[in-house]
Image (cartoon, grey):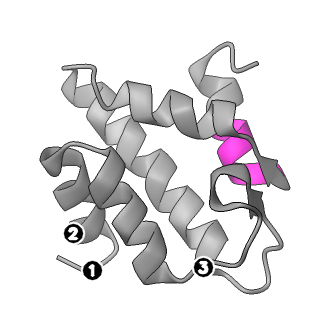
Amino acid sequence: MVKNEKELLEAIKHEHHITKEITDTIIELDQLPSTGTQVFLNDLIVTLYNRVVDVNDDVIVEIFDQKVITPDEFIGWIDDNFTTYSADMFKKSIGKA
């Protein structure tokens, strides 16, 4: 169970298995109006993206059925699950805007 921002950040940065609870929590953060929250959210999804697409980082993301996904599939998940504002900020951060 994710109890606070620090635990969420630690899970995104270091956990081998990213549970659905963690991905659901970051999607919920997208609904909050705070600019600071949006920046924190962007940091989380950029960190997760970098871990998922890094072939040397053996991270498993439960919502992707534990399969290897491509950067484009991850970006598609962002587009499908986050607001346009958050998706655009994310894509700009990774140089895909």
- Which segment did they paint magenta? 9-15
Q: Quadrant of residue 53?
A: bottom right
Q: Residue furthest front?
A: 65
Q: How far across and how far down the image is residue 94, in percent?
A: 34, 74
* Amino acid marked by disc 2: Lys
Q: 21 and 35: which one is in front?
A: 21
Q: Secondary structure at mark 1?
A: loop
User: Which residue appears at 29% of the width and 45% of the height?
Assistant: 82
* Amino acid marked by disc 1: Gly
Mark 1 — residue? 95
Q: CA distance from mark 1 to mark 3?
A: 14 Å
* Amino acid marked by disc 3: Val
Q: CA distance from mark 1 to mark 2?
A: 5 Å
Q: Main secondary structure of the magenta part?
A: helix
Mark 3 — residue? 53
Q: Residues within 10 Å of mark 3 (few under 14, many from 20)?
A: some
- Residue 75 counted in the magenta span: no
Name the image quarter holding the N terminus.
top right
Q: Which of marks 2 and 3 precedes in the sequence? A: 3
Mark 2 — residue? 92
Q: How far across and how far down the image is residue 6, in percent?
A: 64, 26
Q: Which of marks 3 and 1 precedes in the sequence? A: 3
Q: Quadrant of residue 64?
A: bottom right
Q: How far across and how far down the image is residue 45, in percent?
A: 46, 53
Q: CA distance from mark 3 to mark 2?
A: 17 Å
Q: Secondary structure at mark 3?
A: helix
User: Which residue appears at 43% of the width and 49% of the height?
Assistant: 43
Foreground: disc 3 or disc 2? 3
